[in-house]
Amino acid sequence: MRVVFMDTLAVCIIFRGLWNVPFIANAYLVNATVLKRYNRRQLNFDKPNLDADMAFCSNLRELDVFMYVSNRVDYGHLINPDTYDVTRTEPDMYQIFDNAIDWEERYIHKEYPENFNPEKEPKQPCPDVYWFPIVSRKFTRALIHMMESFGKWSSGKNEDDRLEGGYEAVPTRDIHMTQVGWDKHWLHFLDKYVRPLQEKVFIGYSHESPRSLMNFVVRYRPDEQPLLRPHHDSSTYTINIALNEVGIDYQGGGCRFIRYNCSVVDTKIGWILIHPGRLTHYHEGLLVTNGTRYIMVSFVDP
Ligand SMILES: O=C(O)CCC(=O)C(=O)O
Ligand SMILES: [Fe+2]
């Protein structure tokens, strides 16, 4: 039986058609008339010494129900359920490795591929600050949801026991990716989706896999931390993704690059800012006067 089944699978990959098979696992589409024709006792999943799927197929064979695989129509594709962890907030966000196609479809900005159109100049709102669409609204909502349901925002004080040195010179109110078990996923995101953008605009700088220990979501609020004083980041380059909407979710905010007296205040949800971290790009987070502003920040290659 197994040999027949494997042969059928091999044929399915090459041709379109419909094949009678003795066993089907993972996906069943059952015609409702079949369900009506037999009673529950006949259409059951029980048989001594057989797993439920084997038992179900065996019962169908005994009832002469014709089982088949067909690839004449694309119905979708199976996801790999092995690592789907329903105990996580936003479990789909954790599927970047195991269900990469769905992940990209759901969470990457529809205009992301356009970033690589050679006819298009990348947006540069301030000198050497580049701006690209990168993640979908679903991503921004999911990330905020992950962080808010975790809820342990830092105190905004200099002492920070999440860091190796226990001290942060210019602290934000934030939650690190490590705290929600999403750091490996995030590093993969940096490698797969951010690195190609960085290499496009900062020519000649290339690291096989971006290194980043500081990956976090920042929350600004007038009554909590409303701004961030001028500072350098300990990074070769910094990325800063807008997770919600200025003028709707909050007023004020943005990032000012002091050397150029240039601010990005009309930030766009799901868009990433990429800028050098040190020396030339001394910068500050501007005052949020109303509402809550969320951004995702990484200090890449410290
Ligand atoms: O508010 C901003 O956009 C800047 C954030 C920032 O500079 C930082 O987190 O290091
Ligand atoms: Fe910064």
Image (spheres, helix red, strand yellow):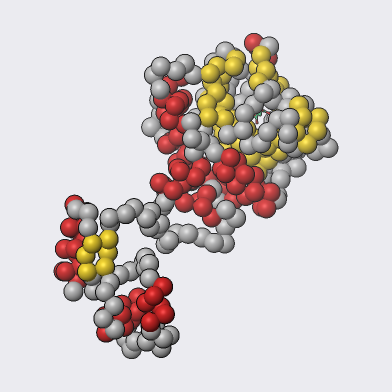
| Image position of 142 with respect to 261: above or below | below
| Image position of 98 with respect to 4: above or below | above
Q: Relative to 185, is 15 on the left or the right?
A: left
Expressed as whole percent of the image width and height from the top left, the position of residue 126 reads 60, 15
Q: Relative to 266, is 188 on the left or the right?
A: left
Q: Relative to 227, is 280 on the left or the right?
A: left
Can residue 202 be seen here? Answer: no
Q: For residue 191, which quarter of the picture?
A: top left
Q: Relative to 183, is 64 on the left or the right?
A: left
Residue at the spot 69% in from the left edge and 49% down from the top edge: 148
- Which one is in front, 123 or 33? 33
- Which one is in front, 118 or 233? 118
Residue at the spot 23% in from the left edge and 70% down from the top edge: 21
- Which quadrant would the N terminus be assigned to in this image? bottom left
| Image position of 245 with respect to 90: above or below | above
- Which one is in front, 175 or 78? 78
Expressed as whole percent of the image width and height from the top left, the position of residue 81 reads 43, 61
How many numbered discs, if any? 0
Of all residues, the one furthest to the top in this rendering is 260
- Which one is in front, 198 or 160? 198
Q: For residue 156, which quarter of the picture?
A: top right
Can residue 125 be seen here? Answer: yes
Residue at the spot 56% in from the left edge and 19% down from the top edge: 129
Of all residues, the one furthest to the right in this rendering is 223
Residue at the spot 78% in from the left edge and 36% down from the top edge: 291
Expressed as whole percent of the image width and height from the top left, the position of residue 218 reads 67, 37
Expressed as whole percent of the image width and height from the top left, the position of residue 270 reads 58, 34
| Image position of 114 with respect to 29: above or below | above
